[in-house]
Image (cartoon, rainbow, N blue to C red):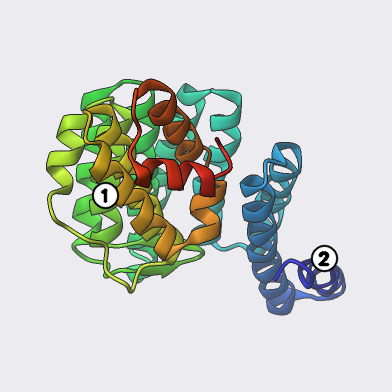
């Protein structure tokens, strides 16, 4: 995808500039999704300034597309900018406003329900990171109610549904530093293969961090291995995995062979 994106963005920008009416709105909708793909790669590889620029472009083209669900998707992604700036208060407020706008606009079918639920799912993580436990769980409860009416799927680039909410159940507990609760909530559940690989992998990365916090070192290794099996590159490049492996190897007097092998694979030895 990476080599084709620049040319695709140029073509769609030309279509937007030259089009009229519905064709122009359609081109802007596609351009918004292309910018989102570019943002995803920029953010993953640490180009925060480029990511922020892509999100600004997304906001502009989503408005020109005149699609409220695209605008909601941009509000979801825009949280990355606030995370980078450590501005959790603004992030939480922006997500709530976007969700309220969707609700007030009235029914828009399953995609609208998914967009609304995803915003609350994201708000749950933001509030968890800010240490606001009640708000975090309330937002996740609202996301869960939405997921009762939207099956697992990818809506405007965002995975949402009952399984995604279940994954965020673990994520919120982890953000709140409730590692024991996180492991307990995870139980023996496994993310279904119908979910995107990165989301399934991220579940095991979150679980691994919680397991490490409560001293379950071998369980930690197994979770990292599962994440690696599902999405090797995502797991290798995830900063949380690298931090956790460094923490385990440096704090444990005699790391297991599994831990050392993972640390060697992640190039942190």
x, y (%) of residue 259?
38, 41
For disc 2, the neighbor class at 10 Å (few under 14, some 14 to 19, many from 20) is few
132 up-or-down from 50: above or below: above
The quadrant in which the C terminus is found is top right
Image quadrant where residue 217 sits: top left
Comparing 149 with 259, the one in front is 259
Instruction: Report the side of 72 relative to 56 (left or right).
Output: left
Q: Nearer the viewer, mark 2 or mark 1?
A: 2
Residue 125 horizontal side relative to residue 210, left or right: right
- Identify which residue, 161 or 259, lies in the foreground: 259
Give the residue number, with chain letter if any, for mark 2: 6
At x 40% / y 37%, what residue is drawn? 96
Please indicate, yes or no, whether residue 120 appears anywhere in the rendered image. no
Q: Give the structural element (helix, strand or loop) at label 1.
A: helix
- In the rendered image of this protein, does residue 253 appear above or below residue 92? above
Q: Secondary structure at mark 2?
A: helix
Disc tally is 2
Asked if the residue under mark 1 is in contact with the one under mark 2, i.e. CB atoms within 8 Å, the reply is: no
Which residue has dot 1 on it? 143
Give whichever of 17, 83 is nearer the camera.
Answer: 83
Give the label on residue 215, or none: none
């Amino acid at each position: 995808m990476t080599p084709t994106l620049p040319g695709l963005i140029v073509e769609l920008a030309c279509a937007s500039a030259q089009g009229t009416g519905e064709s122009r709105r359609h081109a802007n909708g596609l351009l918004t999704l292309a910018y989102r793909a570019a943002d995803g790669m920029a953010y993953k590889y640490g180009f925060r300034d480029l990511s922020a620029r892509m999100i600004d472009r997304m906001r502009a083209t989503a408005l020109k597309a005149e699609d409220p669900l695209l605008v909601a998707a941009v509000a979801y992604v825009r949280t990355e900018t606030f995370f980078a700036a450590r501005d959790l208060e603004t992030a939480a407020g922006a997500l709530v406003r976007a969700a309220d706008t969707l609700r007030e606009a009235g029914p828009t079918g399953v995609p609208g329900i998914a967009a609304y639920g995803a915003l609350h799912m994201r708000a749950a993580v933001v509030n968890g990171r800010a240490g606001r436990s009640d708000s975090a769980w309330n937002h996740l409860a609202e996301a869960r109610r939405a997921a009762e009416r939207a099956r697992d799927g990818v809506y405007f680039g965002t995975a949402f549904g009952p399984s995604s909410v279940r994954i965020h159940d673990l994520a919120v507990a982890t953000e709140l530093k409730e590692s024991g609760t996180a492991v307990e909530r995870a139980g023996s559940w496994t993310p279904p293969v119908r979910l995107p690989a990165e989301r399934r992998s991220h579940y095991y990365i979150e679980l691994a961090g919680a397991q490490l916090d409560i001293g379950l070192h071998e369980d930690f290794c197994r979770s990292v291995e599962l994440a690696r099996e599902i999405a090797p590159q995502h797991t290798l490049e995830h900063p949380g995995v690298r931090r956790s492996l460094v923490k385990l190897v440096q704090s444990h007097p005699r790391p297991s062979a599994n831990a050392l092998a993972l640390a060697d694979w992640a190039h942190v030895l």
